[in-house]
Structures are given as C-alpha cells and as structure tokens.
Image (cartoon, coloured by chain):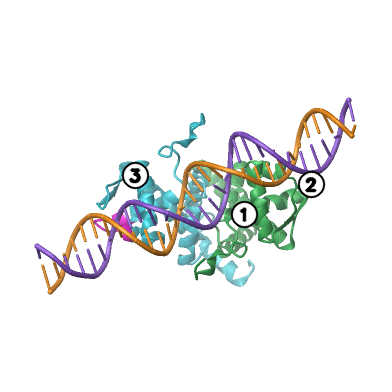
Chain colours: A cyan, B green, C purple, D orange
Amino acid sequence: MNSRDVNNASKRNLTPTMEDYLEGIYNLSQEKRVVRVKDIAKKLRVKMPTVTSMLKTLSEKGMIDHEKYEDLELTGKGSDIGSQIDQRHQTLRRFLIDILQIDHDQADEDACKMEHAVSPATLERIVDFMEFVEHCPGSGNDWLALFNEYRNLGSPG
Amino acid sequence: MNSRDVNNASKRNLTPTMEDYLEGIYNLSQEKRVVRVKDIAKKLRVKMPTVTSMLKTLSEKGMIDHEKYEDLELTGKGSDIGSQIDQRHQTLRRFLIDILQIDHDQADEDACKMEHAVSPATLERIVDFMEFVEHCPGSGNDWLALFNEYRNLGSPG
DNA sequence: TGATAGAATTAGAATCATCAAACTTAGTTT
DNA sequence: AAACTAAGTTTGATGATTCTAATTCTATCA
C-alpha cells in the first residue's frame, strides 16, 4: 500500500454496477417485506454467488446491513442512493417514452444504462425540458402531436 | 473450455472500452499522419502499457494492423466502427448542446458515456427530434428561444 | 425428530481494464 | 559509431465482476 490513498475500498465511490445493485435492492424492498438474494439475482440477471459477494462489498461500504444467512436491509445511505438512482431511471424513462416516443421495453433498457452516464446537470435540464414541453409553449396546439405527425409523415407541413 | 462457446475472445463483441479506443484512434488518424501509442494514451487518459495491451486485443479482433514497435492502422472494420462511434458521439453532443443547452465541456463528457448506453433506435429518434425542432413546428416562432426563456424565467408565459 | 429441498455461502477460477517498474528499440546527437 | 532520449513493450500485480462446483444452513414436512 503506497502513498496514494486511493485504495481504501470502503471509501471509494460506487461503481455503476454497485449503483445497479442498490437500485435493484431498493426496488425489491419496496415490493416485498424481505429482500432475498435469489430475487436480487433474478432482477440483476446474475447468479446468487455474485450477489453474495456484492452484498459483502456493499456492507463494507456501509450501504446495507447484512449478516450471513440473515435478512438484509439498506442503510439510510444505501437507501438514499438507491432511490436516487431509481429517480434518475424514472426521469430518463419518462423522457424516452413521453418525448422521444420510444417503446417501453427499449426505454427501460436504455434508461438503465443512461442512468449512469448522464451528469446531474444534464438530468436537471431534461427535467426542465419535459416541463417546458408539457406546458406546451407558443399557441395552444399540442406540440408533441406535431412531432408525432412529423415522424409519421417524414417531413413537416 | 465448456460447451458455451461464448469464450472465443476474437469473436466476442466489443466492450465499451474497446469502442472508446477505436473512436479515439479513429479521431487521431484523422488529425495526424501517424497514430502514436503516446497520443492514444493521452486521449484515453490511460498509461502507455494499457494502450499496448489493448492494441494487442484489438489486433486479435481484426480491428487494427499493428506489429511491435511499428506503425498502427485501423483495418476497414476498425475504421467503420470507430467512425460509427464518433458519429454517435457527435449526434449526442449536438443534442445536448443545441437542444438541452448544456455547456460544451459537460456535453462532451456526457456524450462520451452516453454513446455506449443509447440504443440505435433511440439515437435515430434523437436525430428525428432535432430535425423536427430545427424545422420549428407550429407558427414561425423560434421554439428553442422559448425554451431558453422558460429556463431563465422559471416559468412559461 | 429427522430427512430433505431450497436458499445462501465459500472456494476457486476466469475475464477485463488498469497500473508501476523494468526492459527494449528506434531515432537523434554528438 | 557510441551515447542518449523518448517511445514502446513486457512482466507481474491489483481490483471489479462474474461464474461453476461444492458446501452449509434453514425451514418445512412427514
């Protein structure tokens, strides 16, 4: 261990993968009384041992409370981050579906990757943008319907 | 090596990291006569040995031509993919800058991550969307300017 | 209570991307 | 040509994420 103190795993930032686990666990804990390793594995599309080892990592980072073979729970910090990532996901999903008119499955898939790529500044701007579009600027016409028409006809009127 | 033939490295799809290298090399080869390991390292923000080992991988995948200590060149395939990723980057960048009005540096940073996250369908829809906005629908007023105003005043007229 | 099925964990391995340190090569300078 | 410098490479290591196979635990059922 050298002088660059970048090495303390329990202090380093979360990787996108870790964020995904927190988001998944957050969602599961809202759906069910207890969160099971099996369910996390299913949601994240990995095998159970992978989950077990990630749980260890997340415990060390203070994101979950978990003792071998026992129940697991997000800590306050873990829950905050989980819900924050979920929030990003929902925002991007809405943008893709409502504005860009992407189909739901594709939107979910894209949102899942984009949630780690988009900066807070850009996400905020997307929120502003959706608000703006939904309040429909200039005249009373349905702006989104125009985009739809444009897409279907290939060219604007 | 078991029955799941997913293991043949030279056949597996490119990872996002490999795509980044191809994009970077593609850009460098447009700027300079010869592409140097040092420059790739600088552009990708990694050390030279990392580049060397990635060059080996990309050679095995048929993306570049490269012999030890000698010049390197993208193959047709490598060049196609490099330019394709660059294209994605440029599209996303334009969207972030022109539509969402994100500042250039931030836009570049975000585009760099988003280029691996966004599906072809969504990217195409973004292109449509920009086209639509730039052809300014309904009446002749400058729609983008309205969004600007909305952002600055906090609420629409 | 014992047997058993299913859930969770450990052990051990592989892949990917990265680095520092040490070494080699190529292209100048003198 | 010998020496030097900068570029490139090899070696060996680490961390992150994943897997399979083997093991351990828990809870239920007969």
- Mark 2, chain letter? B
Q: Are marks 2 and 1 on the same chain?
A: yes
In-front residue for pair A151/A103: A103
The residue that mark 3 highlights is A59
For the question of whether residue B130 can be seen, the reply is yes
Q: Answer whether residue A37 is magenta in the image.
A: yes
In-front residue for pair B80/D23: D23
The residue that mark 1 highlights is B18
- Mark 1, chain letter? B
Coordinates of residue A21 in the picture (x, y in percent): 39, 52
Quadrant (top left/top right/bottom left/bottom right) for the C terminus of chain A = bottom right
Coordinates of residue D2 in the picture (x, y in percent): 85, 30
Crowd around label 2: few <14 · some 14–19 · many ≥20 (10 Å): few
The range drawn in magenta is A28-38
Tell me the amino acid under the disc marked 3. Answer: Ser
In-front residue for pair C21/C20: C21
